[in-house]
Amino acid sequence: MATKMRTGEWRTLYDEMGVRHRDFFQDLRRHRDREKGTVATGPVWKHLATQAKNLAADFDLQGILEAIKLFASVRFQDYDLYLRLIGEVPRYVTSAQPLQLIQFLRLLARMRLRERNYVDMIGAHLRQSFRSVKLNDVVAPRYLVKAANAF
């Protein structure tokens, strides 16, 4: 598919950034599957971390959560990487689903990153969403229990 720009030229919807994201996540998943259960070290993981840092500003919230989850699942130790990815989250908090915010809290706890400002910010938005509608309509109780157990 393509769209016509104001200048009269046609642009494809399969942009270069989408390809970069797809390739990054494919590489990350492939290397994660190889090293699952071990501590990830080596130049490949440093390269993937550098890519993630460079692409972090272009990720949507689901991409940020997935990247954090994949790096954390192999116990990759790069505090700067996690802070760079986590630093993009405040842009999406107001539009995020409560389940995504709970997943974010669980990932923070799993990585033992007790960033107080982020926990307070997420908690405030979750309280607001819980007050506006019934709790069971927002999030299944098992996810709340999982998030509480993570801390």
Image: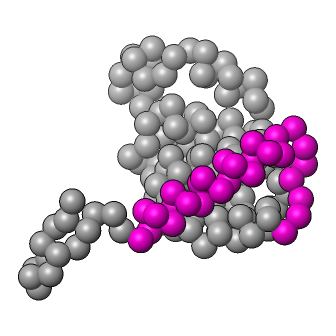
Answer with left or right where residue 29 lies relative to residue 75: left
Looking at this view, is 131 or 20 the one in front? 20
Residue 89 x %, y %: 54, 55
- Residue found at x 53% / y 51%: 63
Q: Is residue 8 above or below residue 130?
A: below
Tell me which corner region of the image, top left, top right, bottom left or bottom right, holds residue 4: bottom left
- Name the quarter where the C terminus is drawn: top right
- The residue nearer to you, when weighing 44 against 108, is 44
Q: Which residues are magenta?
A: 16-43
> Between 5 and 149, which is closer to the camera in this rendering?
5
Within the image, what quadrant is residue 47 found in?
Answer: bottom right
In terms of secondary structure, what is the magenta stretch mainly? helix
Determine if residue 87 is in view. Answer: no
Taking the image as shown, residue 70 lies to the left or right of residue 43, namely left
Q: Is residue 10 magenta?
A: no
Q: Tell me: 23 left or right of 41.
A: left
Q: Residue at x 11, y 85 (%)?
A: 7
Residue 20, percent from left and from top: 51, 66
Question: Who's the residue at 61% across and 41% down the image?
Answer: 104
In the rendered image of this protein, does residue 52 appear above or below residue 117?
Answer: below
Picture coordinates of residue 29, whole percent (x, y): 67, 48
- Residue 149: x and y, percent? 75, 23
- Count the marks: 0
